Image (cartoon, helix red, strand yellow):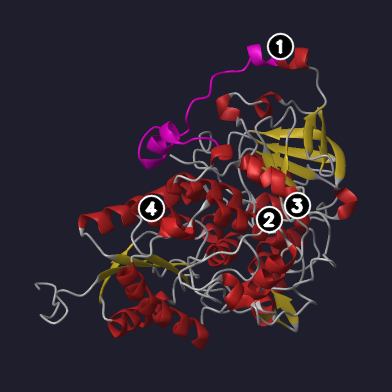
């Protein structure tokens, strides 16, 4: 009562609103309004709302410097914060207000751990950018534009015009990058209500979704409908199938594995590998095409995608989500624009959007966004140029020391070696901006933004810090990337690799104190979701 709860509401369901609002993150600056809508919905439904905050990191802003080391570790920090608040105050249910890359999976992990009624509200994508009738997104209007500027294709005035116009509103970045991939998969899993993933952050539809989610959570508490009733093995495999069919972010592999671990569900990298050999890609969004989340929304959104998957893919299971209705009933009459969401019989490609590559460089697996690779590059051989950090690779790119036929090797950037497994969007975008997107490749034990395109292989396991073979590669070694065979091979004999291993120095953590030092001591490898 000291907080102001009335006598009438003292026995109402206590619903926490875990809000990741911050003025620092474009995807989250509009959340104050959504908090109000959720709160109104909770009180309309007969509950009592309590807002509390959790951290939020914007990968686009954290990119290219030491701040990116905190991005992936923040996932587990956020999950811990939510678990702490919900258990300490014995909340009856949660509405988890999220948007950007690591916050959504963190909230799903927390929901699975707590197993109290929970709904995710993702704040939605931002509006498309535009400058002089040129459609823009965050990646093409900023990161890749820097590469074009350095290659002399645009002048500084045009660069600044593009940067200013590329992100015109609140919301997550416009393409199918990590934030929007995870929002879509959350809806596929049934943990958010229909159209939550694709309704724009500044739209009235998004405000209604927030309000309806607030009402719905009170009903879930009364019916005792919990996350572990929804986050089943079949449901998580549905998310994998949708991910492959969409060609989403490679980061989703890490997050689905971590969510499965939190839910106590047996889903492994083998599930991705099995399904990636079966699923065709039926959706292509930026960075793989010019379509954005706005186009996906107009084409039917996740409901439209589900209609195709439920109809045509036998591995896709019917699910029951937060709406307490069968998915098939929800999508039976869904609108589908087949120019954006293709029929399964007429896919963009019979290849999946994502793939697992294995070989002597990555015996435990690595990940590539197939949808973002030109089909002429599915088989690529090149000579290694090795760098022990992202900064070293960036310096070489900026000095134009990378040439056609090179394979950039960036190592000691994995979960332990980074520490924190930084995204390599800056070097991959610069590679494309320099005109080398189909002429050179990049492999790393770090990870990529969902906006990465080109011949880029990440999540190499074991990582260099664990003595993985990526640590043994030398300049000039021949590397073969074969997407068709799902292989990543270093053309060096086993005998030579053993000789090199004898001279390999033990890894020393780059960070000696604080959160990242603790993280480095406890984190597992990427093939297990980089869980702690």
Question: Between 161 and 186, which is closer to the camera in this rendering?
Answer: 186
**Mark 1 vs mark 2: in front:** 2
As helix, strand or loop, the secondary structure at mark 3 comes to helix
Left or right, 204 with reference to 477: left
> Mark 2 or 3 closer to N-term?
2
Residues at marks 2 and 4, CA–CA distance in whole angstroms: 30 Å
Callouts 2 and 3 close, C-beta under 8 Å:
no
**Is residue 302 among the parts visible in the rendering?**
yes
Give percent across and percent down for residue 394.
Answer: 67, 46
The residues bearing labels 2 and 3 have C-alpha atoms spaced at a distance of: 37 Å
Whole-angstrom CA distance, mark 1 to mark 2, is: 46 Å
Please, what secondary structure does the residue beneath circle 2 have? loop
Q: Report the mark closest to the observer, 1 or 4.
A: 4
Marks 2 and 4 close (CB-CB < 8 Å): no
Local SS, label 1: helix
Res. 357 image quadrant: top right
Residue 121, placed above or below residue 495: below
Looking at the image, residue 365 sits to the left or right of residue 263; the answer is right
Residue nearer the viewer, 512 or 201: 201
Instruction: Reply above or below: 281 against 500.
Output: below
In the image, the segment drawn in magenta is 498-525
Q: Which mark is residue 79?
A: 4
In the rendering, which numbered label is found on residue 499?
1
N-terminal of the pair, mark 1 or mark 2, is: 2
Please rate how many residues cluster around mark 2, counting C-alpha atoms within 10 Å: few if below 14, some from 14 to 19, many from 20: some
Residue 212: in magenta span = no
Q: Which residue is mark 2?
A: 315
Residue at coordinates 65% horizontally, 36% vertically from top-left?
460
Task: Residue at 35%, 60% (x, y): give it.
Answer: 54
Give neighbour class at mark 1: few <14, some 14-19, many 20+ (Cα, 10 Å).
few
Horizontal arrangement in the rendering, residue 208 relative to residue 503 (left or right): left
Mark nearer the N terminus (3 vs 4): 4
């Amino acid at each position: 009562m000291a907080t102001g709860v009335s006598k009438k509401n003292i026995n109402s369901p206590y619903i926490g609103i875990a809000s990741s609002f911050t003025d620092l993150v474009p995807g989250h600056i509009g959340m104050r309004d959504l908090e109000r809508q959720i709160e109104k919905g909770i009180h309309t439904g007969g509950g009592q709302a309590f807002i509390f905050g959790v951290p939020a990191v914007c990968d686009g802003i954290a990119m290219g410097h030491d701040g990116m080391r905190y991005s992936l570790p923040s996932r587990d920090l956020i999950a811990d914060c939510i678990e702490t608040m919900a258990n300490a105050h014995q909340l009856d249910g949660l509405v988890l207000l999220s948007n950007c890359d690591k916050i959504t999976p963190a909230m799903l992990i927390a929901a699975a751990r707590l197993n109290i009624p929970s709904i995710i509200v993702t704040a939605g994508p931002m509006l498309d950018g535009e400058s002089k009738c040129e459609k823009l997104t965050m990646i093409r209007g900023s990161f890749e534009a820097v590469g074009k500027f350095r290659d002399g294709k645009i002048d500084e005035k045009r660069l600044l015009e593009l940067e200013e116009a590329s992100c015109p509103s609140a919301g997550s970045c416009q393409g199918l990058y990590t934030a929007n991939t995870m929002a879509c998969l959350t809806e596929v899993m049934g943990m958010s209500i229909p159209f939550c993933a694709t309704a724009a952050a500044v739209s009235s539809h998004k405000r209604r979704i927030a309000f309806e989610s607030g009402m719905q959570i009170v009903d879930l508490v009364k019916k005792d409908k919990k996350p572990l009733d929804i986050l089943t093995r079949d449901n998580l495999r549905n998310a994998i199938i949708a991910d492959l069919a969409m060609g989403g972010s490679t980061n989703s592999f890490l997050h689905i594995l971590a969510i499965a671990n939190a839910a106590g569900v047996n889903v492994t990298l083998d599930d991705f590998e099995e399904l990636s050999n079966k699923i065709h890609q039926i959706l292509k969004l930026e960075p793989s095409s010019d379509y954005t989340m706005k186009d996906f929304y107009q084409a039917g959104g996740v409901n439209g995608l589900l209609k195709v998957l439920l109809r045509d893919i036998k591995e896709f299971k019917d699910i029951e989500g937060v709406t307490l209705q069968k998915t098939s009933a929800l999508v039976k009459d869904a609108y589908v624009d087949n120019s954006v969401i293709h029929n399964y019989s007429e896919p963009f490609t019979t290849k999946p959007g994502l793939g697992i590559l294995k070989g002597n460089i990555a015996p435990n697996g690595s990940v590539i966004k197939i949808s973002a690779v030109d089909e002429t590059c599915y088989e690529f051989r090149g000579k290694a140029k090795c760098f022990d950090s992202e900064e070293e690779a960036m310096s070489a790119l900026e000095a134009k020391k990378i040439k056609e036929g090179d394979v950039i090797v960036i190592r000691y950037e994995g979960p332990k070696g980074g520490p924190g497994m930084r995204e390599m969007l800056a070097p991959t975008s610069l590679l494309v901006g320099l005109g080398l997107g189909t002429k050179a490749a990049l492999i790393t034990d770090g990870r990529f933004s969902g906006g990465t395109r080109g011949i880029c292989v990440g999540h190499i396991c074991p990582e260099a810090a664990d003595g993985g073979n990526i640590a043994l590669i030398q300049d000039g070694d021949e590397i073969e990337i074969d997407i068709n065979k799902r292989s990543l091979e270093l053309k060096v004999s086993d005998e030579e690799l053993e000789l090199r291993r004898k001279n390999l120095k033990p890894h020393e953590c780059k960070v000696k104190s604080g959160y990242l030092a603790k993280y480095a001591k406890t984190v597992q490898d990427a093939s297990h979701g980089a869980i702690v």
